[in-house]
Image (cartoon, rainbow, N blue to C red):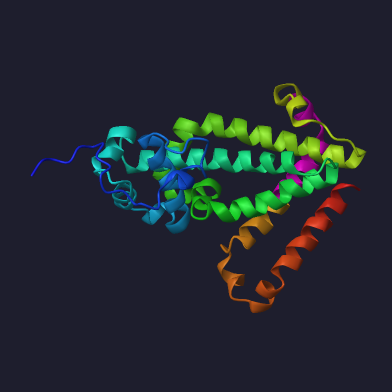
Amino acid sequence: MARRRLSDTSHPDTTLDDEYWLRFGELPQPSMRDKIIFLTSEEGATVGPAVFNVASVCDRLGVTHPMVNHYFGGRDSLLAETAFVVYQRYIDSLWKAVRLAPADPRARLRAWMVQQIEGTADLGGWGGILNYPSSSMHISGLLEERYGGDMRRLFETNIIRLGVLIEDSRNNVNTALDQIDVSALRAQFLADPQTMSRAATMAWSTLGVAVWNAGQHLASAGVTELQANKEALIEGHIERMIATILI
């Protein structure tokens, strides 16, 4: 029997069609390397990186398992790179939601909050690596070593832009996102304790409800009254936070 080539895609999962890949970008057929990352992001969100089985991704793509070593050097390196891609896409989703929001400063702030709540739920199992690095120390170490600087730049861009949204809401103005010079604003942001405090309060409080909404809080998951009123509680939290930040 002829040896199967690393690039052999003769028996892929037929559900992985053009429509599926367009969920991740503009290419209906991305490179095999990107396909491995995208499919890993989906399966990692479902089962969590700790029990993620790279064989499942390879089998669905119709390639041999050494393909992972060929492209990434191993399972943990694949997971570290995918975690970075997942975080990058998560941050991008926040600002896509803001761009699509009505041209009203509070509507844009609300859009950021809603997307953080929904986006955190989409992270699924990746939330462990991104929010609790000690849960997967080796993967988190690779993530920090290779992508730590880029992740911090994404974080700073996100939090500084959030500060602008908050100040816009307080002053009833709309600053175009393309006009926000993060590098120029960084020193100003760090030198203004009130703006920094408001942004931190908004980010922390929204992340708290986002993690709870994602179903990752075991102690409250079985409280039926909370689950029955979840949407109203989240809506109330958003309204209360926006009102508080305007004081």
Q: Is residue 206 above or below residue 8?
A: below
Left or right? Give the position of 167 relative to 204: right
- Note whether residue 141 is visible: no
Find out whether residue 203 is within the magenta segment.
Answer: yes
Q: Which residue is drawn at 91% across and 39% down?
A: 172
Query: From which residue to which does the magenta span run?
Result: 186-204
Rendering coords of residue 109 (x, y %): 78, 45
Rendering coords of residue 121 (x, y %): 58, 56
Q: Which residue is drawn at 72% across and 66% down?
A: 231
Foreground residue among 84 and 1: 1
Rendering coords of residue 105 (x, y %): 84, 41
Name the chief secondary structure element in magenta: helix
Rendering coords of residue 221 (x, y %): 59, 71
Q: In this view, does 231 lie above or below 113?
A: below
Q: Which residue is drawn at 49% across and 48% down?
A: 129
Find out whether residue 27 is within the magenta segment.
Answer: no
Residue at the far top: name it. 184
Left or right? Give the position of 9 relative to 220: left
- Note whether residue 136 is visible: yes
Foreground residue among 28 and 143: 28
